[in-house]
Image (cartoon, grey):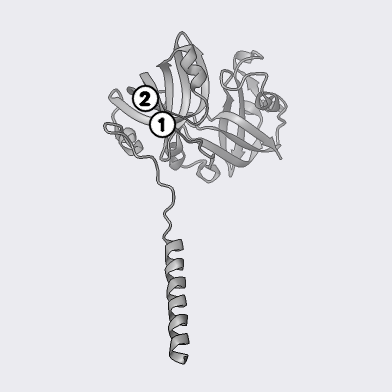
Amino acid sequence: MKKYIALVLALVLAFAVVGCETSEKTPSPTPDVKSEGVMTYAEYDAAEEGSQVVIETYVQGKQSWWDNKATVYTQDHDGAYFCYEMACTEEDYAKLVPGTKIKVTGEKGSWAGEIEVMNATFEILEGSYVAEPTDVTSLVGTDDLAKKQNQKVSFKGLTVEAYNGQEGKGFAYKNDQPGDDLYFQASINGTTVEFCVEYYLTNDTTDVYKAVEGLQVGQTIDVEGFLYWYEGANPHVTGITVK
């Protein structure tokens, strides 16, 4: 009887160990597998300007549509792509909601430091992915910030500065024209970043536009947006929280 009980206990222990090992080895979700002929983000990043690129990516935000051309912010699990003025009907533009997977064929280019996909066409694919903002606060003032270009990002605990040194002024309108793009500057650890509220992305009816119009020098803020580049970091803001 003792041998029988010992055998039963041994079997129970063995199954418990197997169960633990199985649990520990449960695979995590894998990144998207690219279709044949489609670049990984690393391959896109290494491609020369002016060369043809083919990518599969996911819409994260829409900036504008006009003259059958769409400008959208997109991202996959490894990096982000700013698709500038893709050929697009108004009907298809309506389908480009956040998370929509698209295959884009175009040319890699740049403007004022902003890396983009231009002269592109696209097709909508099955699949969906909405990225969470990456906190890049610790990268401000370093060369590594540029590696996050076009991604959905966040900045925490910034201090609003007087815009271009204008005492008491926490923001400015493009061309001093209300109802156009808004700019403001905020700093962390001695480094100042210029932010843009891109009118075509977040116009004067949005909460973020109104929040920036109310900024005061010295306030502490958290910011979310797309890490656009214009002669340096110039994030396009989609959310702002005054602490």
Q: In the rendered image, which residue does mark 1 sit on?
A: 57
* Above/below status of 92 relative to 158: above
Is residue 141 in view? Answer: yes
> Where does the C terminus fall, quadrant-wise?
top right
**Residue 176, numbered label:** none
Q: Position of residue 230 (x, y in %)?
A: 47, 26
Q: Position of residue 177 (x, y in %)?
A: 64, 13
- Residue nearer the viewer, 142 or 126: 126
Residue found 43% across the figure and 84% down from its top:
7
Question: What residue is at 70 percent from the left and 32 percent from the top?
Answer: 217
90 lies left or right of 155: left
Q: Residue at x 43, y 15 (%)?
A: 88
Residue density around tag 2, few if under 14, some if 14–19, many if 20 or more, within 10 Å: many
Amino acid at pointer 2: Val
Q: Would residue 119 be seen by someone viewing this image from the given angle?
A: no
Do the numbered discs 1 and 2 sit on residues whose CB atoms are within 8 Å?
yes
Mark 1 belongs to which amino acid?
Thr
Which comes before the other along the chain, label 1 or label 2? 1
Q: For label 1, count other residues whose C-alpha is less than 10 Å away and answer few (under 14), some (14-19) or many (20+).
A: many
Instruction: From the top left corner, tell me how far across and down residue 48 is, in percent.
Output: 28, 29
- Which residue, given by chain and number where applicable, does mark 2 sit on? 104
Outermost residue on the front side: it is 1
Q: What is the spatial separation of the Cα atoms under label 1 and label 2, in whole angstroms?
A: 8 Å
Secondary structure under the numbered disc 2 in the rendered image: strand
Q: For mark 1, give the secondary structure.
A: strand
